[in-house]
Image (cartoon, grey):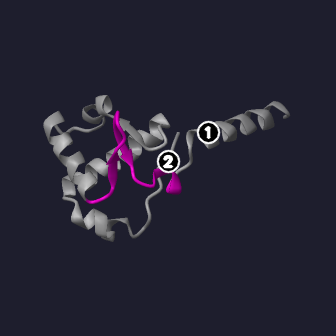
Amino acid sequence: MSWVKLDDKFTGHRKILAASPEAAWLHIEGLCYCAQQETDGAIPDTALAMLTRFSKPKAIKLAARLIEVGLWERNGTGYAIHDYLDYNPSKKSLEEKRKAARERMAKK
């Protein structure tokens, strides 16, 4: 099970306030996708419509808004959540923690 970290001031952050409520929700869905899939904040174009209930055209429009307000960026093959790794663990660190846990459990 993975977790997404949200600051308790998230809902009042200037970037969230500048995004529409629907775009802010897509941002949360994107955060959840990245944590679940361990993508280090990357959202491929092919995954955008699958991670939300918004239609593909609507999701693309909302993603453009997230880029405008500075929450997301284009990365060539899709989107990247700005500063994702500043607040969430990387895939590598998660793998290292799992390995350490397996080794700990094997010693018992």
Viewer-side residue, 13 vs 65: 65
The structure residue drawn at horizontal position 14% and vertical position 41%, both measured from the top left corner, is 58
Amino acid at dot 1: Lys
Give residue 3's mark: 2
**Residue 12: x and y, percent?**
31, 71
Give the residues drawn in magenta, as a range. Answer: 69-87
Does the magenta portion include 73?
A: yes
> Badge 1 local density, few (<14 within 10 Å), some, or many (20+)?
few
Q: Which mark is residue 23?
A: none
Residue 23 vertical placement versus 95 (above, below): below
Residue beneath the point at 85% across and 33% down: 107
Residue that badge 1 annotates:
92
Residue at left offset 18%, top offset 34%: 56
> Reading the chain from its start, which is encountered first: label 2 or label 1?
2
Would you place residue 53 above or below residue 26 in this image?
A: above
Which mark is in front, 2 or 1?
A: 1
User: Label 2, label 1: how many angstroms apart (C-alpha)?
Assistant: 15 Å
* 79 w.r.t. 65: above or below: above
- Examine the rendered structure and indicate whether residue 48 appears above or below residue 83: above
Residue 13 percent coordinates (x, y): 33, 69
Which of the pair 29/62 is nearer the observer? 62
Describe the element under mark 2 as helix, strand or loop: loop
